[in-house]
Amino acid sequence: MTARKLPLRVLVKGASTVNWISPMGGPRTDFTFPRALEERLLADGQPCQVQTITMTSEQTSKILSTWQREVLGYSPDVIVLVYGHYETIHLFLPRWLERHANSLRARPRLWNRLYREKLLRPVWMALAQVQARLDRIVPTIRANRPRHVVADLERYIGHVQQAGSPLVYCFELLPPTERFRSWFPGMAERIGIMNNAIADMVERIDLPHVRYFRVAPIADRVSGGDPELATPDGFHYSPDLHRAIGDALAEDIGAWAATQPHLAGAPAPARDEGTA
């Protein structure tokens, strides 16, 4: 039988940590980590298709309503999940107001500019300052948030196992840098709690193809221990960090792909007579 070698299929999902580079506006070679992953896999001789589905300020709960159309037809070999970050923001203010105030879809019209500059932005900043002050006197994190994030991720991982047991990565989240913590006083602590909850979930699932991907050691290596260089705007990865994450993912995925007959070019296993 002729050996069949198929392209490795990768699905990357997450919020702005996936799609935003800090700072923006650089050359075309400033890749986000999914593109850097694709580049590295191809350079290593691994045919691949990397599909990225991402939206700023996306909540983890959204993945349960989209997984069938994103996974069942595409049947990815690898799924990368970068979720839980948004739920660590204090969010006393309504989510719709935060997204409206920071929307990138505003039209360049005079009335729209005046509304945003004279009304929306000042009101939003004043409310955000109140929110930051309140954040110093309330519990570090609402107990249900990490529990809900983990429950959603675990349910999603269970669902996608039906599509050929793909390799799944759940990302470690980076805390905001020091100069941005005045706006988000308890966020670093909340991210620590969220990371522990996600790591515990992966350990509890206890499958070799469901993995917790550590980002902090890569950030430390790239930045020489200076968080401001790893995430210049306080939250989003620098071009160098994106590329380093892509390289690290490619190395781990490549080792896993070598064990998969359809990706290594080995003949497909024989099937029993009468199997549909």
Image (spheres, grey):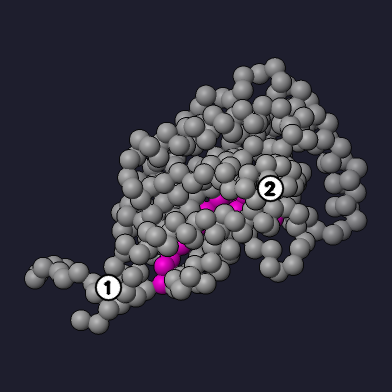
Quadrant in which the N terminus is drawn: bottom left
**Tag 1 residue:** 266
Q: Residue furthest left?
A: 273
Residue at 56% over, 69% down: 39
N-term mark: 2 or 1: 2
Q: Does residue 181 belong to the magenta stretch?
A: no
Residue at 32% over, 45% down: 207
Q: Mark 2 or 1, which is nearer the eye? A: 2
Considering only vertical position in the picture, is 26 above or below 20?
below
Residue 139: name its quadrant. top right
Name the foreground residue: 57 vs 266.
266
Q: Amino acid at mark 2?
A: Ser
The magenta stretch spans which residues? Answer: 7-21
Residue 240: name its quadrant. bottom right
Q: Return the x and y of residue 276 as percentages of the image width and height.
A: 16, 68
Considering only vertical position in the picture, is 3 above or below 263?
below
Residue 87: name its quadrant. top right
**Tag 2 residue:** 223
Name the foreground residue: 15 vs 235.
235
Q: Residues within 10 Å of mark 1 (few under 14, many from 20)?
A: some
Q: Left of 212 or right of it: where is 102?
A: right
Residue at 77% over, 29% down: 182
Q: Amino acid at mark 1?
A: Ala
Residue at 80% over, 58% down: 107
